[in-house]
Amino acid sequence: MFLLKTSNRHRQIIVIKTPNQMETVVNHIEVAIALPVFQTFTYSVPESFADFMATGKRVLVPFGQRRVTGYVFGQSQGSNTKEIKSILDILDEVPLFPSSMVPFFKWISDYYKYPVGQVVKNALPGGLNIRDYASVAITEKGRHVLAHDRLATIARDVLSQLRSGSVLVKDLNKKIKRDIPGTLLYSFERCGWITKEWKLAGQKTKARLERFVRLADTTLPVDHLSKTRTKIIDVLHIEGEISLKKLKETVPTAAALIKSLENEGYVTIHYKRVYRDPFGESIEPDRAHILNQEQLKAVSQSSNYLTKGYKTFLLRGVTGSGKTEVYMQVAAEALKNKLAVLVLVPEIALITQMERCFRARFGECVAVLHSALSTGERYDQWSRIIQGQATIAIGARSAIFAPFRNIGVIIVDEEHDASYKQEGSLRYNARDLAAVRAKQNECVALLGSATPSLQSYYNAAIKKFTELTLEKRVEQRPLPDIRIVDLRQSRDMRGIRRFITPELQEAMKASLERGEQILLFLNRRGYASFPVCGACGQPMRCKHCDISLTLHQQANAYRCHYCGFSRAATSKCEYCGSDKIRHLGLGTEKLEAMVASIFPKARIARMDRDTTQRKGSILKLLKGLKNRTTDILVGTQMVAKGHDFPNITLVGIICADLSLSFPDFRACERTFQLLAQVAGRAGRGDKRGSVILQTYNPDHFSIAAARQQDFIAFYRQEINFRKALNYPPYSRMVQLKISGKDPHETENHARLLGDLCRGLKAPPPDDYQSVEVMGPIEASLTRVAGRFRWQVLLKGLTATVLHQFINRLMSENPKVFARHPVQVTIDVDPYFMM
Ligand code: ADP
Ligand code: ZN
Ligand code: ZN
């Protein structure tokens, strides 16, 4: 086996030669495989690879009958001496992650019960994985047979197809328009008519290279050159070196001309790696604010720890207290100490804002990582971090995997935010991982929020975290004045007036007259969330889910928010065939229409998942607010998040109760956070802000506490409930989610799982006395996307005991956790209980 890597100026060629079995093995490495297996494997490294080998690179390894991608975790710590296979290739020139991340990946795999190689695969930017494809080619003997022998039709077809060159097996079926049995190809191979070879395909992400032009010889005469060529030379005199792309702005035909200029010795052309800018806005540099007393204290307390080991701080600062400035100054201190900074922000809208702040302060050393970037862009940003060009990374939850070697501080803004919890595939919480990574890297974690999660504040209360507080808004700005409007009084109203109460309408009118901006918050998208048949009273339901459809007027369809199922807006009642459908239930789309009918002159925009699908649309909406081309922004929880727009003076909360009725023990916590956050968007400039909070439950403690913006009052009440019911943070939870297409099979599997759990608890001595097994019960959404859903909830006093329990459950009953036909998913520290 030999690897030839020619790195000429602009291309990297990897050639794989046939393995040489005689080669000396120089060492053994530990490799994590990107397949659903929990353990790592040992492979040997032949001598010719030794110089290229490093932890954090991908390798191609044989695994069973296949060749798969693996990740090098370092020297193997002794193997179980079975036959050790040799790696086939090294796939990266530079490592994709530092060796300090290996324990992090292992911790995640163990804690969240997810195969370790797939943890790494999840962490790396997409598009890097390569796959194996078989390709077949015809031999001389095959050609001879084809020309002279009588063959079955299918044999003739296959061989004829191969006459013009080798073909991937997967494409062969398509080309001759019928299924070719694998055995047929094997027999051809055995007869020596064809040869099979493995080809690599699927690697999509490559570095982007651009052509740059530079003056070569300045002494050459230029008088005989054409006008345009002279112009190119002139530009190069000024610029020194310039990208062809830029040059074309002045000389559109440059591409054709530079080649000849190069041949004549005037210029040199070379390729350079360029980084795709995710937003492409130019950002003006800014200077640090002079910190107020509270900010100063927070900055000095946390930066004092920067080089002293692990500590997690919880920065609780009311909305508008200047937490971002604290983050930036702590970050500056970290950079001074030559340490990297990791900033996690909920979702994309806030990344833009945080990115702008950090770019303005720190310039080019900022990398951005989030899901809205194209694969290529993400790959570029990743490389900048690996190569040390970026020392600050800002991103959504997956940025917790940014491949920094030496981290000074991991900042988690709006740490309470639900978007830190990943729900699909690898179920993790990035906020929790921030503390884990900080501990492993012996650095500082700084979690900030105006409305901390109960979990984090509890950790501060028991001194696991250190609390820092900002009690006041910057420059003595007052908190907004929050007025409660009782929706029960307008219960009998019809149409618009039921939700745009006279109080709200009055306040909106006054704000508009003063030329100020308004935010209206309603946590439900679509036009009508509860379409009901006017004749028989049946609601319009999703075909695949146990949920009502939502009418989307713009899309002209009823849609399911869980599985995407849709029916035409002209659909009739499925039960009685009536076409009189009443569009009950208010969504942001209807709200927008109502507001437009009351204030026809106002410029209204809407921000929810429907209006922010397209790339750049969020940015556009935020720009509208910033440039004051939008007077009223209507939106879902997307508008509640940390935005800082000084001209918003009125916030209207249309119906505060929507999240209260969820069957989830965090319903009160979420409601409080949402209301306090959205209220906090008002009055962030010089003018005082006011909030109108409409509710059916004016006396509910979550709503009362949000009205006072009093986190502590909320915490004291809520923590007592949690304690009384032994809910987190007083216990830990693991949820087993059971789902399948057949209702009985699913139920049976859930019951079996429940019995197995209880069985583990039963035998004395009871190791798992503190583990409570709840269920199985049907999930509150009993069916989603055609799958029936059940759950078993495990509650334990510590994470350790729960993990021991789960480990035993899994190792003793591997079949129960195998995927088919009923799927069991393990959700450690579950967040959405429905
Ligand atoms: P938070 O995240 O705490 O809600 P921000 O960090 O968005 O608040 O800060 C609110 C505003 O206050 C921002 O416009 C910021 O530039 C400004 N600000 C922050 N610190 C100071 C300071 N020390 N003096 C003056 N203005 C400040
Ligand atoms: Zn009907
Ligand atoms: Zn559905």
Image (cartoon, rainbow, N blue to C red):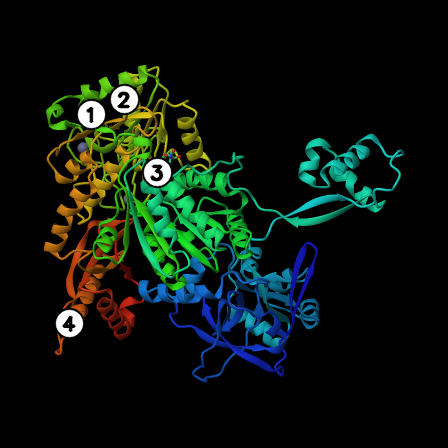
Can you give x and y, in whole percent of width and height, for residue 498 in the image?
17, 23
> Who comes first in sequence, dot 4 or dot 2?
2
Q: Residues within 10 Å of mark 2 (few under 14, many from 20)?
A: some
Q: CA distance from mark 4 to mark 1?
A: 52 Å
For this rendering, which residue is in front, 499 or 575?
Answer: 499
Q: Quadrant of the N terminus?
A: bottom right
Can you tell me whether the CB of the residue at mark 3 lies under 8 Å from the nearest atom of ligand 1?
Answer: yes
Number of the label disc, if any, that sits on residue 292? 3
Q: Nearer the viewer, residue 382 or 525?
A: 382
Residue 428 in view here: no
- Gap in angstroms between the C-alphas marked 4 and 2: 57 Å
Gap in Å between the C-alphas at discs 2 and 3? 43 Å
Please name the residue that numbered disc 1 is placed on. 499
Mark sitting on residue 241? none
- Type of the residue with mark 1: Phe
Which residue is at a point 20% across and 48% down the rendered structure image? 666
39 relative to 480 in the view: left or right: right
**Between discs 2 and 1, the one toward the N terminus:** 1
Is 30 situated left or right of 590 in this image?
right
- Verify CB contact (< 8 Å) between mark 3 and mark 1: no
